[in-house]
Amino acid sequence: AVVSTQSTGELESDYLALFKKTVAMHEMYLMRLAAHSKLREDSNFRVFLEYAKDLKVRTKNKKELIGGFFKNMTKNVDEALLSSQKDKDEYFQERRAFLVDYHNRIKETTRKTELLSESTNALSMDYMQLAGGFALLSVQDPQLQRFMGQCAVTFEVMQKLQKRVSTDEDLKLTDLFKYYQREAQAAKSLLYRRGRALADKDIAENKLEKAQEKFKDIPTAEAYLQDCKIRFERISEMAKTELDTFKARRLETYRKHLVDMSELQIRHSQSKVSELTKGLELLREL
Amino acid sequence: SSGINAEYGGTAKVRFGGNNENIQDQSLFIKRRKAALERYLNRLMAHHLISKDETLRRFLQEEDAPRPNPNASGIKGFMKNMETMVTKATARINEVDEWYEDKQGHILEMEETLKKILAVVDNIVADRRDLVAKSAAFGASCLHLGEGEDNASLRRAITKLSELENNLSTVHSEMADSDLFVFGETVKDYISIIQAAKAAFDERVKTFSVWESSQSTLAKKREAKNKATLQGKADRVAQCDEDIRFWEGKVEKCQEDFEVISKNLKEEIRIFEEIWVRDIKESAISYFQKLIDCENQIVGHWKEFLPEAKIIN
């Protein structure tokens, strides 16, 4: 029902808004990859950035789908097992607690922002219909022709401005929280992978003890333990760096988005005031 | 006591509001009803004839509050009367003056448009009230999010965002009220007034009907006299003469009535159109003013928040 009442112009502006949103999200993601000391070196990434022609797009193949499915399953199992894991490292213990809590909170906020955004958007359609009502009165009543004509014009502009309020709210607020919900989830996953590495290391230590007791397969067990230790230390080091940059990026991005959002909303509301004031002056004369 | 209560046995007590369970809906309903009744009384008093009505004046000066009379028919009875009034008007007038048909068509058109506009206003009000709820809910979640932040300036900013959204929620509520009270109610009032205008047109048609039927009765009486004369029934002829004189008088009176009602209708419609134009313009202007006021408040709130966002570090 909404689509059928939209003119070409409205559909165009809706498309542009969506396009803008998608581009912004992609830009944020690509900048993130490019800023990462390891990921920026990835050959696939470079090819993607430098490829001159159009890239072919395809959906996930069966292998990827199934792989993704299992990955989710194990992730959930890991999360359940490791959420109760005791970590001697206070820093990571605290960080994990923070991220789990933060992720829950931001998930809620993201949902509420989406609902708010929908609501803000609904109002723009209403303004359009009100403009239509004024136009009808203008046509039917010769004494109100110019007066109601002006009202209709003003509300057509109000509709455009309300649409801008809505798309900018979506772009700067909803997408901000959506993005950081996913980032928080990614940070959680990282800590779970570290937790997995820690658990593996503990298991390897047990295995070595058992091997030493039985005088069996000691070199294998020692080698395996060594691997686990190295892996654990490497992931711990990386995790610390990642968490620090996560915090820094979050500050910067929130700041930019919230400042942009404020400036845009001030501008839109001021435009509304100016349009309404202009209209009012004309109405008083008619 | 010798007041209205004694004379009319009280007033009709009517149950309104449907299934309004929650307090907010009830108080909103009372607010609307009170404002509507006030506007109604103002309109009555502004009318050059109605303002002189004895009963109305006594009602307005009455010391005692109206007592409910369980036997009074109230709204249901009134609506039933309106129905019968409208359905009985079926006669076709051969209009000398096309003004009546044109005006009636114009009024029906106006009714349709106003109903459309009212539906739109109702949508706006509903969507704005939704916005009130959604921004408050968002504000609450921001407060919660702020508490979970590990950076002090970010915590402060998100908490300030929560304050902002609560303030915006209040402005949206004000706007919803103005959508309704400043503009919507005027539209609603005029839809009601149009019903009265329609009834007035129908009343004129009925008057014409009565005139027509009295004319045909007169014709019948004249025929009866002819018959009686031919039959040589002197008594009956005398009776018929009496009847004819009576019905000639009646026809004259009916014509007079029709001309008076036609004249009054024209005048009332003229006044109606004048007042309509004045009222709707006033209403629209007030509406614009209220929106300007609210949007300025919104600017103010965002300007308050902006420095908080800038100092995130």
Image (cartoon, coloured by chain):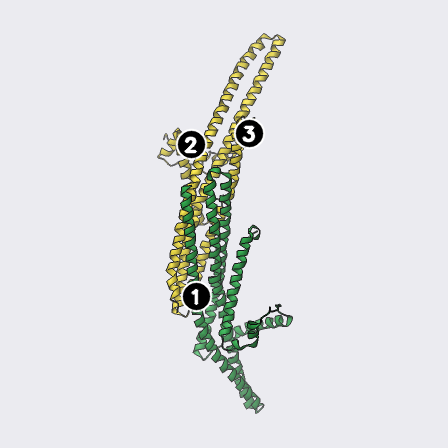
Q: Where residue A150 sits in the image (x, y, percent)?
A: 46, 45
- The image quadrant of residue B154 is bottom left
Is disc 1 in the same subunit as disc 2?
A: no
Chain B painted colour = yellow
Secondary element at image label 1 = helix
Q: Amino acid at mark 3?
A: Ala
B35 to the left or right of B241: left
* Mark 1 burial class by Cα count in 10 Å: few <14, some 14-19, many 20+: some
Q: Amino acid at mark 2?
A: Gly
Q: In the rendered image, which residue does mark 1 sit on?
A: A256
The chain carrying label 1 is A
Above or below — where is B61 with respect to B159? Answer: above
Q: Are marks 3 and 1 in contact (CB under 8 Å)?
A: no
Q: In the rendered image, which residue does mark 3 sit on?
A: B89
Nearer to us in this view, A101 or A156: A156
Secondary element at image label 2 = loop
* Mark 3 burial class by Cα count in 10 Å: few <14, some 14-19, many 20+: some
* Mark 2 burial class by Cα count in 10 Å: few <14, some 14-19, many 20+: some
Above or below — where is B254 with respect to A80? Answer: above
Q: Where residue A174 sits in the image (x, y, percent)?
A: 48, 62
Q: Give the distance between the C-alpha atoms of the residues marked 1 and 2, in whole angstroms.
A: 71 Å
Chain A painted colour = green
The chain carrying label 2 is B
Residue A42 visible in this rendered orientation of the protein: yes
Outermost residue toward the bottom in this view:
A215
Q: Quadrant of the N terminus of chain B?
A: top left
The chain carrying label 3 is B
Q: In the rendered image, which residue does mark 2 sit on?
A: B9
Q: Quadrant of the C terminus of chain B?
A: bottom left
